[in-house]
Structure formats: C-alpha cells, structure tokens
C-alpha cells in the first residue's frame, strides 16, 4: 500500500526490456543492424511516452530519473534565460527534486518565490499571477502532490503563464497513468515523468520540452537526445518505459477502481477516534489516502503495520530517513506533532478490497496500543 514510493514492474514491461539486454544490445548511435534495432526500440518508446501526454515524439527527452527531469527543466531553463531574468515561481509543497533545485539556484543568485498553499494543499492561481515580475523566467508547480494527493489547478496556472508568456513546468510524476495528461490543455512548456512510478523500471525519466523552449544542457558529451542530454541512452529501460506508458494510457479508465478502494479505506480508517484526512477531500489523486492520528507517531505505526505485513509510509520515501516532519504537511499548516502523526497509503493496480479490509481490521489495534504508551495522550 505504498505505490507512490515505487511500483512493481509490469510483466509486459519486463518482457519488452529483455531483448535489449541480450540479442539486441546495440548502441542506438551505431549505424549497423543491432544499433538500428536499438534506435528503433528507443524511438518507438519515445512515441508512446509522447502519446501518453498528447505531445510530439521529438518533444520527449529521456533522462536518468524523475529527479533529473526536474533538475533539467528548472536549471536548464533558468541558466538559458539568465540574461532575461533571474526569478522563479514555485510552491512550498513541491517534491525535493524541484524544491532543492530551486534552493540551489538561490545560492547562485537566482530569486525564488515559494507560494503558500491552503490547508487542503491547493496553490491559488491568483497568487501565481501576483508573484510574476518582469524578471520571472519560469513557473514550476506540480500537477499533484504524491504525499497528500492534492491535485493543483494546472490548467488555470497554464493559462496565466501563457498570457504572460512565461514557460510553465509541471512535475506530473505522481499523476501519470492515474489522470489523463495533455500538455496543450495544461498549457505547459515542460513536464516531468518517471517510469518507476508507473509500473516501469527505476532509473529512467523523461522531460517533455515544448518545441521552441530552449534549455541549457546539464550533461555535455556526445550530443545525444538533441544535444540536451548527452550519454548513451538506457535502451532497455527506455523500451520498458515505452511499454509502461502505453499500458498507463490504456489503463487510465481503471482509476475508478482505485478511487473505490481509496474511498473505502478513507471511510474505514476515519472510524478510528481522533483521526483526520490530510489533503483535499475531492481534488485528490485516485490512489492517495493520508490520515493523521492524534497522540501517535507515524514511524511507530509504520513499524507495527510492517509486522502485520502492510507496507505504508509517513510521507515521501525520499525523506523518511530524516526525522524532520514532512515539509508538505507543515506547509498545509499542521503543527509538528500533527505532521508526525500522519500515515500515507497509496493504492496500486494489484491491490484488492481484501487488502483494504485487512488494513482497516489491523490499524485500530495498532493506534490504540500506541496511544496507551504515548505521553501525548495523557
Ligand atoms: C518520485 C518523484 C520524483 C523523483 O523521481 P525519481 O525517478 O525517483 O528520481 C519527483 N517528483 C515526484 C512528484 C515524485 O513522486
């Protein structure tokens, strides 16, 4: 129940990858047969990834991760347009791949506005518009937040960005395969994807770069990926990403099943005394359940759930090793102890109602047990 951390690789995806480790191991830049086969697989995958988001094939750049896609979008655009301006607008609840990239750019003299969010985690498009100055060269607001599940009004933000002629980047890593994506409807110039969040392999990402959007490369070398991302491409990973993108598009209607399981889990979990839903009640990812319990710590709940065979998380997998409460929950106005008492379940294609019922059956006992030994509960 932690599919926002990562997903299992779909069997059809593994199958699509295998030939490119063995018989068809060629370098896609080579001119002979196995090289051309590798290139064909890569270009086929590029078309499938483009199709998932309503883009053109030549607007897709393959990268080594979602993190790299976010870095390339933000640094690449900021560096390229430095003479025009040095101001970036983002939100306070972005993934660290966006947030820490912006913080890094501040050390290089860029100015960044981190917009606040409502208590449901929503960015107000009026705040985006008000933050724009003559020096703004980029707006980066995520499509949906994988921690609390809140879906942002990206179309409205895209409209504002277009009116003001400012490139708009969105991190759509949490929504790909769950919500329909269309780069024109969203009004984005840049959009990040990551294969391992959508039943593809780890270590492959993509960045959509709208035609006419210039980026300064982060990696220099042989000029791969239209000179934007040098380095021999991860052909097996990319072939797998293509298959995952195709399946993701076909399976978007199955999101209804996720919504049913999600709502059933929310209802069951909220029957526990002193529990509250984090994030937005309606504008919410189909797979996301984030709940907080007074007087208990998320980490203790995770360990106890693990003993019962349930994998859940306190927030993002990337930051769970630190003891700092989630920056996302704090930005929604929660106190430290409230953020610490939060638990996230993210439902995947393989989960069933039985899984949900099992969680609902074991969780109350865990919460009660932890409350008995909690100094906060007295
Ligand atoms: C997982 C994730 C990332 C990072 O992607 P990796 O491929 O793991 O580097 C970035 N943004 C969001 C919203 C994510 O969920």
Image: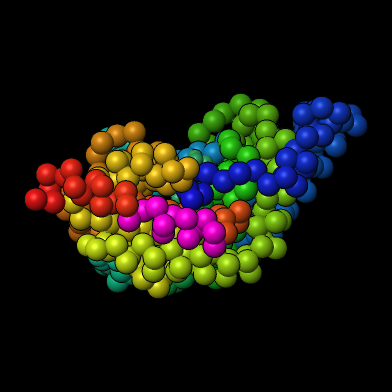
Which is more toward the observer, 224 or 312?
312
> Which range is magenta?
353-364
- Left or right of 199? Residue 83 is left
Whole-percent x, y for residue 127 in the image? 27, 67
Residue at 54% of width from left, 39% of height from top?
65
- Look at the picture and state if 80 lies above or below 233: below
What residue appears at the point 67 percent right and 53 percent down from the top-left corner?
245
Residue 119 is drawn in which quadrant? bottom left
Answer yes or no: is residue 327 visible.
Answer: no
Q: Is residue 13 left or right of residue 358?
A: right
How are the residues colored?
A: rainbow
Majority secondary structure of magenta residues: helix
Instruction: Establish if 348 lies above or below 32.
Output: below
Residue 360 is a magenta residue:
yes
The residue sitting at 54% across, 30% down in the picture is 219
Tell me where residue 147 appears, x and y as whole percent: 38, 53
Query: Which residue appears farthest toward the left when viewing the image?
Result: 378
Q: Is residue 111 left or right of residue 152?
A: left
Total numbered circles: 0
Residue 313's place in the image compared with 286, above or below, is above
Q: As rendered, which of 242 and 42 lies closer to the eye?
A: 242
Whether residue 245 appears in this view of the structure is: yes
Residue 133 vertical position relative to residue 5 in the rendered view, above or below: below
Q: Residue at x 32, y 52 (%)?
A: 365
Magenta run includes residue 211: no
Image coordinates of residue 343 in percent, x first then y, are 34, 51
Q: Nearer the viewer, residue 193 or 83?
A: 193
Q: Residue 271 location, x and y as percent?
A: 32, 66
For the residue pair 330 and 167, the one nearer the viewer reads as 330
């Amino acid at each position: 129940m932690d599919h926002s951390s990562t997903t299992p690789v779909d069997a059809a995806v593994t199958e699509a990858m295998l030939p490119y480790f063995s018989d068809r191991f060629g370098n896609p830049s080579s001119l002979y047969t196995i090289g051309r086969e590798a290139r064909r697989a890569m270009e086929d995958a590029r078309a499938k990834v483009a199709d998932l988001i309503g883009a053109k094939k030549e607007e897709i750049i393959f990268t080594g991760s979602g993190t790299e896609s976010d870095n390339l979008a933000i640094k690449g655009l900021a560096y390229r347009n430095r003479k025009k301006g040095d101001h970036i607008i983002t939100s306070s609840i972005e993934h660290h791949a966006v947030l820490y990239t912006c913080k890094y750019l501040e050390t290089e003299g860029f100015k960044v506005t981190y917009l606040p969010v409502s208590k449901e985690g929503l960015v107000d498009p009026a705040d985006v518009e008000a933050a724009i100055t003559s020096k703004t060269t980029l707006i980066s607001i995520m499509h949906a937040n994988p921690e609390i599940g809140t879906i942002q009004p990206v179309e409205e933000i895209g409209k504002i960005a277009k009116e003001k002629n400012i490139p708009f980047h969105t991190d759509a890593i949490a929504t790909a395969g769950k919500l329909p994506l269309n780069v024109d409807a969203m009004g984005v110039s840049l959009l990040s994807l990551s294969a391992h969040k959508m039943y593809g392999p780890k270590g492959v990402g993509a960045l959509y770069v709208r035609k006419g959007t210039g980026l300064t490369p982060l990696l220099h070398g042989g000029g791969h990926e239209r000179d934007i991302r040098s380095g021999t491409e991860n052909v097996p990973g990319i072939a797998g990403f293509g298959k995952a993108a195709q399946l993701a598009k076909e399976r978007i209607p199955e999101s209804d099943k996720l919504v049913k399981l999600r709502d059933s889990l929310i209802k069951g979990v909220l029957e526990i005394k002193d529990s509250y839903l984090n994030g937005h009640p309606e504008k919410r990812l189909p797979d996301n359940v984030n709940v907080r319990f007074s007087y208990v710590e998320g980490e203790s709940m995770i360990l106890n759930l693990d003993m019962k065979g349930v994998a859940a998380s306190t927030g993002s997998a990337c930051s769970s090793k630190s003891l700092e409460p989630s920056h996302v929950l704090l930005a929604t106005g929660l106190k430290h102890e409230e953020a610490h008492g939060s638990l996230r379940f993210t439902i995947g294609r393989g989960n069933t109602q039985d899984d949900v019922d099992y969680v609902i059956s074991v969780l109350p006992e865990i919460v009660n047990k932890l409350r008995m030994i909690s100094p906060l509960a007295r």
